Amino acid sequence: HKIFLNGQFFNPKKNYLPLIFKEKNYSTYGFLSSSILDRAFGTSSGFDFYEDNINTERRCEETLNLFKEKLNTLKEPFFLWIHFFDPHSPYTPPENFKKNFENPYDGEIAYTDFCVGELFKILPENTVSLIIGDHGELLGEHGELQHGVLLYNGAIKVPCLLINPEIKNKKFSKIISFEELYNIIYDYFFQDKKLDDILNKIEEKPVISSSLYGREVFGFEEARAVIFKNYKLILYGEKNFKLFDLVKDPKEEKDISKEKRDKTKEMIKILKEKKFPSNLGDFPKEGEEILKSLGYLTQAKEENLKDPEKGVLVENKIREALEKFQINDIKKAVEILNSVLLEYPQHSEALSALGKIYLSIGENKKSLDIFKKLYSLRSNDITANLRYGQALLANNLLDEAEKILSFCIEKNPRLKEAYGELSKIYSKKGKIEKIMELQKKAEENKVEDTILLFEVAKIKESEKKYDESFLLYHKCYKANPLNLEPLLALARVSMKKGNAKMAINYYTQILKIYPNNYEANYNLGILLYILEAKKDESLKYLYKAYNFCPNNNA
């Protein structure tokens, strides 16, 4: 399939499983938990139903509940893909799983296991099921905290369970690749072969892994690995390699390449027979423009390529900086990122992290300087464009921001953040018709952004379409119940609809979260006095409004 990175456009061939099952008269359903599998990237091909309306990611229970709603409408025979995403950083399992595990990653795994168990309670009994992971996490082994760059077994060895009434309690010990797994599925369903026979005939052969992620995103040397007959070789670039005996050294700690020179040469030869693209421009022409727009054709310069095992230590510093930012230690976060940029001035991830921190704390000029530099380095990268557009908007450079953010939506019509930011610009410019056009485009692409919805709600309110505006404000509130603006709007529109009691309820709710809010205190005080003649209580809120009046204009 020639896909090496999240965000690449997938142009499926006839051998894509959903297309094959659909051709064989199966109904096909997909339920996703992460936006990396958004239909914008081509993964929905062959599916009759594809549930991918996700902000960034959602918990497995949310995805499972969406499937439950659809369960009674499934047409048999069916092909079903349910994707759970929880065991990814940041590791934040639900409270009842968090308290039972010292390591939150273990809590997320247990939570996902629970969801898988709940799924199997409701699947038809005759369902053939395959449970498989796409990767593990190194959790600090060999220097990498998560996954994506290094190819040690902690990251690439994954569980694979096949549940079928034909076979019970059988362990298959051979190492197989995802390619082999595809062949197993195809032979079982479409070649009328018994599963036991298929598994028994599998021969041991080299299993190859690769990661171009470090090369394309961070400028490291590409990583490749091959496992064959208890040996494993990891190759970085062309000349940097390690050999391990997986029987004697399952943790891959002792490099024996110098002791086993012939075995090393044999394994390197196997790896080099498998061709990988030298850059993502080697991909089919039909996907090239989309790949450029996503930033995956922006090739790091060769002189900047680094040993991945040293490079991940830099990535760890960036993650440390982001953790400091999360606990509001801004000074330390900025200090760490600046130390990285002192050594690697063009490190795109460090630039992006520093720019976002500056933007979040209102250092808009510094943020613009950082994102302008990132944009100059990766002008075809959609995320670099988005961040640059946000920084331009924060600095009130509306025309430039409009141009950049419009480009983002043109290149990726499902880029949710860009819709909200662009709607702010149109609102500042008073371009009401542009906001409505943007909302129409969002609906066409199944995008729901609350910032955009809020702007549309304001328009409906100004047109005295209070029922419509109330529903839109309520959507914004449900998306983030702690957001002040939708709550104030709901109270205001409730008054305009003639429902003063509802307005009182909303203002009371606001003051539980924001007790010093001037508008809520003032309006609640007035309403209590006029409608309920509660003079003492009314005065309490009005005095607070007086004390917290902006610019002392009470």
Image: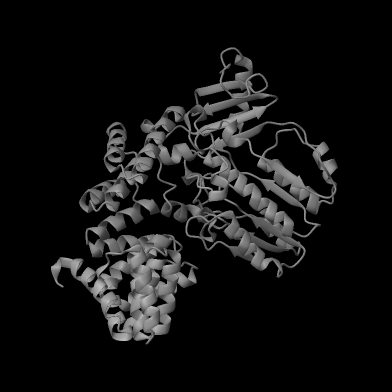
Q: Quadrant of residue 459?
A: bottom left
Residue lying at the far front of the rendered structure? 536
* Residue 120 percent location from the top left of the image: 72, 54
User: Left or right: where does residue 337 sit relative to residue 46?
Assistant: left
Residue 470 location (% of width, % of height): 41, 79
Q: Is residue 545 visible?
A: yes
The colour mode here is one colour
Left or right: 335 with respect to 5?
left
Classify residue 382 as left or right of residue 67: left
Q: Position of residue 424 (x, y in %)?
A: 31, 67
**Percent position (x, y) of residue 101?**
56, 40
Give the vertical position of 276 relative to 271 (above or below).
below
- Which residue reaches farthest left? 552
Judging depth in this view, the residue of 63 and 7 nearest the camera is: 63
Image quarter (top left, top right, bottom left or bottom right) of the C terminus: bottom left
Based on the displayed image, in which of its 4 quarters is residue 171 positioned? Answer: top right
- The answer to whether residue 456 is visible is no
Residue plotted at (29% across, 33% down): 339
Which residue sits at x=33%, y=84%? 532
- Quadrant of res 346: top left
Residue at 77% across, 53% down: 128
Q: Residue at position x 62%, y 25% from top?
A: 232
Is residue 130 positioned above or below 271 on the image? below
Which one is in front, 165 or 504? 504
Return the residue nearer the eye: 228 or 267.
228
**In the picture shown, does residue 31 fall above or below 489?**
above
